[in-house]
Image (cartoon, rainbow, N blue to C red):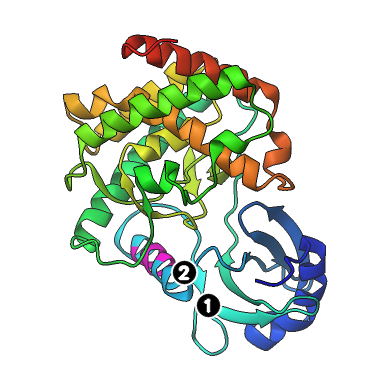
Amino acid sequence: MGTLLEPDDIREQLQSQLLLHYDLPGDTKVYHLKYSENFTYRLESEMTGEKYVLRVNRPGYHDLTELESELSWIRAVKRDTDIRTADVLPGKDGKFIQQLAFTGSTDKYVCSLFSFVEGIGIRGMSTEELIPYQKQIGEITAKLHLHAMTWNADNSLPRFHWDIEDMFGDTSRWGDWSKNPALTPEQKEIFAKTVEIGCKKLEKYGKSSDRYGLIHSDLNINNILVDGDQVKILDFDDCGYGWFLFDLSTAVLEYDTNLSEMTRAWLDGYQTVRPLSAEDLEEVDTFIVLRKIVRMGWIASHWDNDTVKRVTDRYYTETEKLARAYCERNGGCL
């Protein structure tokens, strides 16, 4: 892999390449929106007022087949459900993925164009404001799961997995959580015990088709917009095969003092569409605490990332409290 370019380097070069690949107004300008797993840009024409979002994928994270699969699911969700998310827009050649070459890197970058989704983010809202939206997020997630269970019934869509090996194995997708430099030795010890207990419980829980399948996997606070009383979802980039309750753990990933309220709201919403069993509900705490630890690996491997810059020590201390309580409940207190 070549040198990873900076977001502004890409933005400047996109300006001259966009009209070669997409049928956009001639005065379309490129504005940096976010750098997380990928590079995201807002496109806007002053002349027509048209707005779009362009995602430039980080080289090496997905292959073309995986990207095509993601976009296929988004288009199917738009076609088959009432879920509000961005449309995927084709290039001049009719293809949904365009390949780009940038000066300063030998890598081939790929990009996808999406419609601009109007709305406001939910970060900073009070718990009282968030609860009705969180219920909707639960409902939407259940609809996604039901859609995936029929549209991709044979699990043939080429996407990666979010199972124990991919979360905590030697080649874990988001990196080794224990290498996060913000962790103390004591925190590493309690998190290691938590992972040991949680993974054993998930092995017992199993991967039957009513528990494990195609999931969004990234419906966190950053990928939710609201417009009045409507919830809209973004960013299927991490969709893959995992436990359905993994989507719950991501939806409450950044909550701490209001974690129980937000978990309950999500579950209430989800179960209006797709009821859960007692065995499912028994593992809610397992998914929540493991997902918070998985995020530490992502933080450690994306230290210069826009999203990581918002993470404070509070995240680690609150997750430590959660992990200690989890171990105590499951007979593994240190």
Q: Which residue does the image show at 71% across and 35% down from the upper left?
A: 310
The answer to whether residue 91 is above or below residue 179 is below
- Find numbered disc 1 in the image and state the secondary structure of the residue it sits on: loop
Does residue 91 appear to the left or right of 9 in the view shown? Answer: left
Please state which of residues 174 and 14 is positioned toward the viewer in this rendering.
Answer: 174
The answer to whether residue 237 is above or below residue 199 is below
Query: In the rendered image, which quarter contains the N terminus?
Result: bottom right
Q: Residue 139: horizontal and vertical position, in percent? A: 33, 38
Please state which of residues 175 and 227 is positioned toward the viewer in this rendering.
Answer: 175
Q: Which residue does the image show at 58% across and 71% down from the upper left?
A: 113
Residue range highlighted in magenta: 70-76
Q: Residue 57: horizontal and vertical position, in percent? A: 60, 66
Residue 135: tell me if it is visible.
Answer: yes
Q: Are marks 1 and 2 in contact (CB under 8 Å)?
A: yes
Q: Which residue does the image show at 30% across and 42% down from the upper left?
A: 243
Mark nearer the N terminus (1 vs 2) = 2
Q: Which residue is mark 1?
A: 97
**Is residue 75 shown in magenta?**
yes
**Residue 67 marker:** 2
Amino acid, disc 2: Leu
Q: Which residue does the image show at 63% across and 59% down from the upper left?
A: 38
Query: In the rendered image, which quarter contains the C terminus?
Result: top left
Q: Quadrant of residue 20?
A: bottom right
Residue 128: tell me if it is visible.
Answer: no
